[in-house]
Amino acid sequence: MGNKRQSTYFLLAIVVIATIVSLVIGILIGRSLNRDSVSPPSNDEIYQRWREAVEEDEDDGSLTKMIIDEMNPENIKESLRKDQPNHAYILSEDNSELFKTAVEETELVPGDTLDNAVPPFNAYAKAGVVEGDLVYANYARATDFEQLQTELGVNCSGKIVIARYGKGFRGEKAKQAHLYGAIGLILYSDPADYAIYGVDQVYPDTVFLPSTGVQRGNIITEQGDPLTQGYPAKG
Ligand SMILES: *[C@@H]1O[C@H](CO)[C@@H](O)[C@H](O)[C@H]1NC(C)=O
């Protein structure tokens, strides 16, 4: 009985890790489950089941140990964006590329670039390609989306939202954009907030963000490391 439960958990643990760490591996596991004619639960369902097990304290520690032991640094490295940088494009109506964002920031002072600096990205943002019309949503707070919807009659469903950093956590902005049906979110640093004495009064002359500078952070709105929620994570 205990063994059966344990082996169910083991499969679940593998699936959870694979789907979170690597979409590709997730797809492969989904296929092999299909071959055994078991319809694979969606990533969200798997994640939900695992979270419930942890929250209801049904895990005697073995599930967590398995999850932690299965954390293969190679898998994690594959998911890092270093070799898969984020790009935002502006396309014309005939799909030709009018603009593409840079991968790295400009080195404004020689020697400023650190070898181990990560390129701009927001951790835990889902990888993918989305295309759609752009909607400007101010700071992407709940109130901003409400105003768009009720006062301006703008529906963000299926749109890419562009919004500025500030006045709240970036993860909350992503959450709100998602709740209002956006398929993507572009966050930028508005000079009004990050170069308050003017765009010519920025680093290296002042501490304010230059036009080529990009903020980094994560967009998690829950507690802790999502791979080991409720438990310590090993580095
Ligand atoms: C927004 O558009 C979507 C998709 O067309 C639709 O399902 C939804 O009801 C709309 N929301 C509002 C508030 O009009």
Image (tube, rainbow, N blue to C red):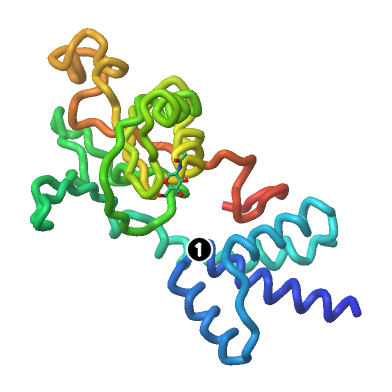
For the residue marked with disc 1, what is the amino acid?
Answer: Val
Please state if 37 lies on the left or on the right of 62 as rendered. left
Quadrant housing residue 61: bottom right
Of residue 125 and residue 180, the one placed in the foreground of this image is 180
Residue at the spot 47% in from the left edge and 49% down from the top edge: 124
Does residue 197 lie above or below 188 as drawn? above
Horizontal and vertical percent for residue 88? 23, 47
Q: Among all residues in the image, which is located at the extreme right? A: 1
Horizontal and vertical percent for residue 57? 84, 54
* Viewer can see residue 76: yes
Does residue 202 lie above or below 61 as drawn? above
Does residue 96 lie above or below 221 as drawn? below
Residue at the spot 71% in from the left edge and 49% down from the top edge: 231
* Viewer can see residue 218: no
Number of callouts in the render? Answer: 1
Q: Mark 1, residues whose alpha carbon is within 10 Å: few (<14), some, or many (≥20)?
A: many
Q: What element carries label 1?
A: helix
Q: Does the residue labelled 1 lie within 8 Å of ligand 1?
A: no
